[in-house]
Each structure stands twice: as structure tokens, then as C-alpha cells.
Amino acid sequence: MRYRTLDPRLIVETAERLEGRIADRFPDAGLRGVAAELVSLSRDLAKAAKALEEPIWWLRGLIVAAFVAGVLIFVFVGTILPLDRISGTDDAVQSVQGIEASINTVILAVLGFLALIRTEERIKRKKVFRQLHGLRSLIHVIDMHQLTKDPATLSASFKPTAHSPARLTNAADLARYLDYCSEMLSITGKVAALFAQSVNDDVVIDGVNDIENLSSNLSRKIWQKITLIDGRQLPR
């Protein structure tokens, strides 16, 4: 079963190892701070995903109490107000109306009970999307850090302007920087997948897939840059 589920501990360890690699190669870069934030967020979201696996016991107790109360009310009404008094057995029209009203009441009670059952799903779904919002923001922060890392700056004919940002002029460093960004995006996708593993809900799975598609698309854009850089066989 080890390889059939994602292990949150290993995901966090991978993020920590990546932070150390970035710190070794780019100790003064802003990307190091982003990597540290990814480690912190991975830890928090791993705990949040694990917590969502547990049932909401107080809510389930409330649902059971509501169900028992509803049954007792029906029994009480049926005992105090017998059917022959309510419907009037001598009047066929009133009897039909009484039966119809009883059926409608039962249907509404069942629908209300089902709505209470699905309340737990809605609560967990809301918690998941609150966590995914922070993860989505971090993905865009990672993308911003690779935005100005353009392989065209390695060309001898490239001439920076007065407003050009600081550039990496070494091909090996530039390729490694972009590779680190791609790895960070991959980790965000795996962190998001922890929620799909913990909460078996179609809406949650769709939200997780959106996060993974976003990180994959941005990572693909980064690798298009890497392929333009010579000498990609670089030490890690």
C-alpha cells in the first residue's frame, strides 16, 4: 500500500531538501524565501488534509439527534391525533387529502435528513478550498520569480536597458534556477493532491485538478526556457 497513496511526510521532506539545495546555490536569492514558505505551507496543508480524514463527530451526533427528534414527533402526533380524527374516515375526500399531506410530510422530512447528511461534505469542501486558495497564490509567486529569467540574456548580442532587472548571466545557474522553480511547482501539485486523497468528493477533486493543471502548465513554460539553454547536464 506504500506506493498507492501519497505520504505527506515524504512530500514535506522533499520540499525541505529542495529548500536546502536552493540555499546552497542561491543563498541571497528571493527564491530561497519562496522555498521556505513552500516548506511551511506543505507542513500546514499536510496536517489540514490529515485532519479532514476524520469524521466531524459533533455534526454526526447532531444529525442523529435531529433524526430521533423527528421520529418522536411523528409518533407523538400519530398518538395524540389519530388518523381517523384528522382525515375523517367517513369522508373519502378528506381521507385522500390526509394521506397526501402525510406523504408530503414524509418526503420533506427525508429531504431534510439528506441535506443534513451532506452538511459534513459541504463543511469539508469549504475548508479544502480555503487551503487551496493559499496554495494557488504561492504558485503564482513562483511563476513571478521565473518571469525575468530569459535565456535570451545569455546571447552576446543582448543589451540590457536602464530598467532591466538583475539577470543571471551564467547558463548553468540560469538552468538550475529554472529547474528549481519547476520542482517547486511540482511539489505544490502533490500537496494539493493530498486533499483529493483525504476527501472523496467530486468538487474537491475538480479543484485539486485545477491546481495541478495550473502548476503543470507553468512548469511546461519553464521547461521551454530550459531547452533553449545549452549544457543542461548540470550537477544538482
Image (cartoon, helix red, strand yellow):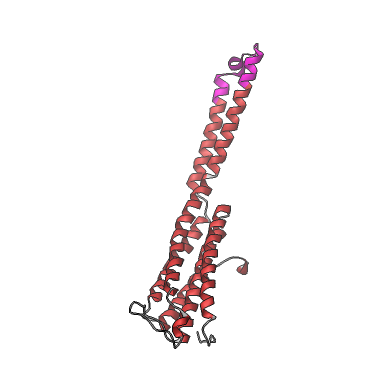
Q: Is residue 31 left or right of residue 98?
A: left
Residue 186 at x, y percent in the picture: 52, 70
Among the 4 quarters of the image, the one containing residue 37: bottom left
Q: Nearer the viewer, residue 57 or 212?
A: 212
Q: Is residue 163 left or right of residue 119?
A: left
Among the 4 quarters of the image, the one containing residue 40: bottom left
Please determine whether, in this image, residue 231 is positioned above or below residue 67.
below
Q: How many labels were placed on the picture?
A: 0
Residue 45 at x, y percent in the picture: 46, 62
- Any part of residue 14 in sight: no
**Which residue is most to the top?**
90
Among the 4 quarters of the image, the one containing residue 91: top right
Q: Nearer the viewer, residue 39 or 156?
A: 156
Residue 202 shown in magenta:
no
Q: Residue at x 51, y 45 (%)?
A: 119
Q: From which residue to which does the magenta span run?
A: 76-98
Please determine whether, in this image, residue 133 is positioned above or below residue 67.
below
Please determine whether, in this image, residue 75 is positioned above or below residue 157.
above
- Any part of residue 184 in sight: yes
Q: Report the magenta stretch's main SS.
A: helix
Please determine whether, in this image, residue 74 is positioned above or below residue 169.
above
**Quarter of the image where the N terminus is located:** bottom right
Q: Residue at x 40, y 76 (%)?
A: 32
Q: Nearer the viewer, residue 187 or 45?
A: 187
Residue 74 at x, y percent in the picture: 56, 27
Residue 120 at x, y percent in the picture: 52, 47
Q: Nearer the viewer, residue 87 or 221?
A: 221
